[in-house]
Image (cartoon, helix red, strand yellow):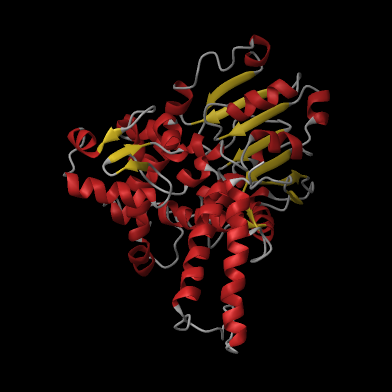
Amino acid sequence: MASSKMIALAQKIASETEKVEAYFKSNDLLTPSFDADAPGDFPIMPDDVSRSRREVIHATQELHDLMVGPRESVRWMAWDVTTLVPLNGSITLSELQAKTSLDSINLARLLRHAMTNHVFQELKPGVIAHTAASRLLAQDQDLQAWVIFNTEGVYPASAQVVKALRAYPEATSLTRTGFNFAFDTVDREPVFVTVGKDPKHAERMAQAMNSLTGGEGYELWYLSEGCDLTDVDARGGTFVDIGGSHGFVDVHLAKMYKNIKFVVQDLPSTVESAPKPICADAKVAKRIQFQAHDFFTEQPIHGADVYFFRWIMHNYSTPYAVQILRNLIPALKPGARIIINDHCLREPGTENPWDERLIRSMDLVMMSLLNAQERGEEDFKQLFEMAGDGFVFKGVTRPKGCRMSIIEAVWQPDEEVDQASATESLSGLTLT
């Protein structure tokens, strides 16, 4: 049986690397490393050794792309002429050019650059066909939306981050971000308002978030695996999903737990656009209700067992995040669980390298769009401490294979806690 492409690449990497290593050793040269005092450049080497080095560079990129897989590869790139190429068969460059506004020379340049990332292939000169990656992008509308959201929103915002930081180095305001500078909305409105003004853009952003939150390492089974709600189910308790969009988390959990009642809260426009019914299974649908609610106002559902935030806290800097938690307090009963489902940064270098790159990239996206951040365990603990003395931090768990963590606190107020004094503890935190 012939070796797979992966094995062939791995063997090539090993054998060609040995040749480069042998050259360094035989010439008593320092080998490449990431140490601060490592050589800044490769030495001039004989042609055969230089050829081996280039083979390693190319093979490692190919093996990387195979191991990451087409969907994840495309998710972290940006491209879209894919829908113009037939899913089956091929198309000539001249035929493709007729479907675009690009001239033939620049179209060819763009396509051939994409091919270096395994997006499209050229079967013979001037004849273009799909690869697995480009085909996925052509067929997956949520993935298309993610790519467009990045190219039209994130990239322009990123280009203006330095300007925003120079003007407002505290970097906490929702309206003084790289996005605001890029789209001329400084001190006027946050990104969600800007995007929400255009129904097409709002729908695209929702699709983009669906693509990300349903991607590798974010699947909902990790949540149900790492978050035990058996006790809540046993007493027929209430689970409030704050900022829960169209309730996909609640549908998932309601299929597992047969007695929990779910309330999905979001802004009116989101609630109005939710699917009706929320689920084809009537027994599931009847236990899920929607409620229009802005989490910057006081929580209206009193006495629930769980108040849940997924992909919420990383959208907000500390003053906003603290206020969101504080707005729960009037509604909380002793023992109420506050569960945050978000990234939780580990100590640098302890995460696996691929996940660390993606999570820390997301951290910078949050800064570019919202002056927000991904947080570590101590950061989450401090949020609860700042929000009020009654929050008892229970720690962080992260299911194996998941990129998201489950951060939990319980409301256990001291009878002597003075809510007015707790409010005063927010002094120094301002929302702008």
Q: From this view, report whether residue 68 is shown above or below residue 168.
A: above
- From the viewer's side, name the closer residue of 31 and 243: 31
Q: From this view, report whether residue 262 is shown above or below residue 286.
A: below
Compared across the picture, whether 60 is left or right of 146 comes to right
Q: Position of residue 22 (x, y in %)?
A: 61, 79
Q: From this view, report whether residue 20 is shown above or below residue 102.
A: below
Does any portion of residue 81 appear in the rendered image?
no
Compared across the picture, whether 110 is left or right of 56 comes to left
Which residue occupies 47% across, 53% down?
366
Q: Position of residue 265 (x, y in %)?
A: 55, 29
Which residue occupies 42% across, 49% down?
77
- From the viewer's side, name the closer residue of 40 and 412: 40
Q: Position of residue 45 (x, y in %)?
A: 47, 81
Q: Quadrant location of residue 399?
A: top right
Q: Residue furthest front?
A: 1
Which residue occupies 41% across, 38% down?
134
